[in-house]
Image (cartoon, rainbow, N blue to C red):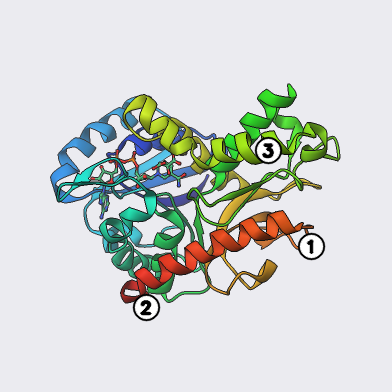
């Protein structure tokens, strides 16, 4: 059996509780891969993490390899093939008497976590390691991590798969088509209320979803806002941020990177811009992606009308502002 090393931070948190069993069940990396888990938590939470480790053992999955728990990111990063960076504070909490309302407000709380983590993964991780940042604000945290990794052979991503899944769910409800029929859902830009879920370039049986729906009022005023604000809708309803669906989206992203993408479609994640679609180089930007021969590439030449270009400009500007705010953390 092949063996891989998977680093997960925030391993005692709510997302990880849904994520970890699925990493070792054989579902994510396939039945012929043994998965060694390298679990990272802050020291006060290591005891609680031990409870999760006991449960993982009790699942009895035959794809489960060794399980390490540590608060030392350097120890955990050694030879990692994948790093799922979940560890960070969710919004909704109150810090110094001020409630954190938006994901971007977490920059100064969470951004610093990603300097040491980036450095450790860049120096100790495998040369072809893949890194998925889930902790918010995910795009700019990934920017901080990637710049501190000082390693351009590794692939840094921020998660927008949850937004793409939310967009597909809304389209499925609206059109009464199954999720599998909806192809090529792109989330452009930031995992924030400025994200742009693109229905012009998404398709069902080869036809544009926006043409099928044929209701720009619904698309612009209901669908867009619903998807952009879904994280808040969930926090308001359950008193905690999304967890099972976030873990599911992380698993989807890993699977999408691990196997080549089927013809005629793509998946969503944010990666470092190479200037595609006029986005400044280096920003971690939500793009349409395909995996070809094991390599992740940005899908080129999608048509964007003026409305879409305007939305992409707004989310680009927000990412530039976030980058400016954390310039001291960027190596
Ligand atoms: P949680 O509070 O339940 O768990 C977070 C865990 O991270 C905690 O156990 C905490 O001890 C740990 N942690 C904090 N600092 C750490 C560090 N330096 N190293 C290792 N671990 C550390 O939160 P959660 O619900 O699991 O959410 C985690 C993050 O994911 C939040 O920032 C949340 O906003 C974000 N999130 C992102 C998406 C997305 O689509 N990108 C979706 C849902 C949640
Ligand atoms: C989400 O989209 O559910 C997460 O980013 C959590 C949040 O703060 O909205």
Cα–Cα span, label 2 and label 1: 32 Å
| Above/below status of 309 relative to 163 | below
Quarter-wise, where is residue 222 in the image?
A: top right
Q: Check disc 3: other Cα within 10 Å, few if <14, some if 14-19, many if 20+.
A: some
Task: Estimate the x, y position of residue 300 in percent, counting from the top left.
Answer: 75, 63
SS for dot 2: loop
| Above/below status of 44 relative to 144 | above
Residue under label 1 = 301
Q: Residue at x 32, y 72 (%)?
A: 329
Q: Check disc 1: other Cα within 10 Å, few if <14, some if 14-19, many if 20+.
A: few
Foreground pick, 97 / 190? 97
| Above/below status of 4 relative to 174 | below
Tag 2–tag 3 contact (CB < 8 Å): no
First in residue order: circle 2 vs circle 1: 1
First in residue order: circle 2 vs circle 3: 3
Tag count: 3
SS for dot 1: loop
Q: Is mark 1 within 8 Å of ligand 1?
A: no
Residue under label 2 = 331
Q: Residue furthest right?
A: 206
- Label at residue 219: 3
Closer mark to the observer between disc 2 and disc 1: 1
Foreground pick, 274 / 30? 274
Task: Estimate the x, y position of residue 290 in percent, counting from the top left.
Answer: 69, 54
Q: Is residue 18 visible?
A: no
Closer mark to the observer between disc 1 and disc 3: 3
First in residue order: circle 1 vs circle 3: 3
Q: Residue at x 23, y 51 (%)?
A: 70
Tag 1–tag 3 contact (CB < 8 Å): no
Q: Is residue 319 left or right of residue 259?
A: left
């Amino acid at each position: 059996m092949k063996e891989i090393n998977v680093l997960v931070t925030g391993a005692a948190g709510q997302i990880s509780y849904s994520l970890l069993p699925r990493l070792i069940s054989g579902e994510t990396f396939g039945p012929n891969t043994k998965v060694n888990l390298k679990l990272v938590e802050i020291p006060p939470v290591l005891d609680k993490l031990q409870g999760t480790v006991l449960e993982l053992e009790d699942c009895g999955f035959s794809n489960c390899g060794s399980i390490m728990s540590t608060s030392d990111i350097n120890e955990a990063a050694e030879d990692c093939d994948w790093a799922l960076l979940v560890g960070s504070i969710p919004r909704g909490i109150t810090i110094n008497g001020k409630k954190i309302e938006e994901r971007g407000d977490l920059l100064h709380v969470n951004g610093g976590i990603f300097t040491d983590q980036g450095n450790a993964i860049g120096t100790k991780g495998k040369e072809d390691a893949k890194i998925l940042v889930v902790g918010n604000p995910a795009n700019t945290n990934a920017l901080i991590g990637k710049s501190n990794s000082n390693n351009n052979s590794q692939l840094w991503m921020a998660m927008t798969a949850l937004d793409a899944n939310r967009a597909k769910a809304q389209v499925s409800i609206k059109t009464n088509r199954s999720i599998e029929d909806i192809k090529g859902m792109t989330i452009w830009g930031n995992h924030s209320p400025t994200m742009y879920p693109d229905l012009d370039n998404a398709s069902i049986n080869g036809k544009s979803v926006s043409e099928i729906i044929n209701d720009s009022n619904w698309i612009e005023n209901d669908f867009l806002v619903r998807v952009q604000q879904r994280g808040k809708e969930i926090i308001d309803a359950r008193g905690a941020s999304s967890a099972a669906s976030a873990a599911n989206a992380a698993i989807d992203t890993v699977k999408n990177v691990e196997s080549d993408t089927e013809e005629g479609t793509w998946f969503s994640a944010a990666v470092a811009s190479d200037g595609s679609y006029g986005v400044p180089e280096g920003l971690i930007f939500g793009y349409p992606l395909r995996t070809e021969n094991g390599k992740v590439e940005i899908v080129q030449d999608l048509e964007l009308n003026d409305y879409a270009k305007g939305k992409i400009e707004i989310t680009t500007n927000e990412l530039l502002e976030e980058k400016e705010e954390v310039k001291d953390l960027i190596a």
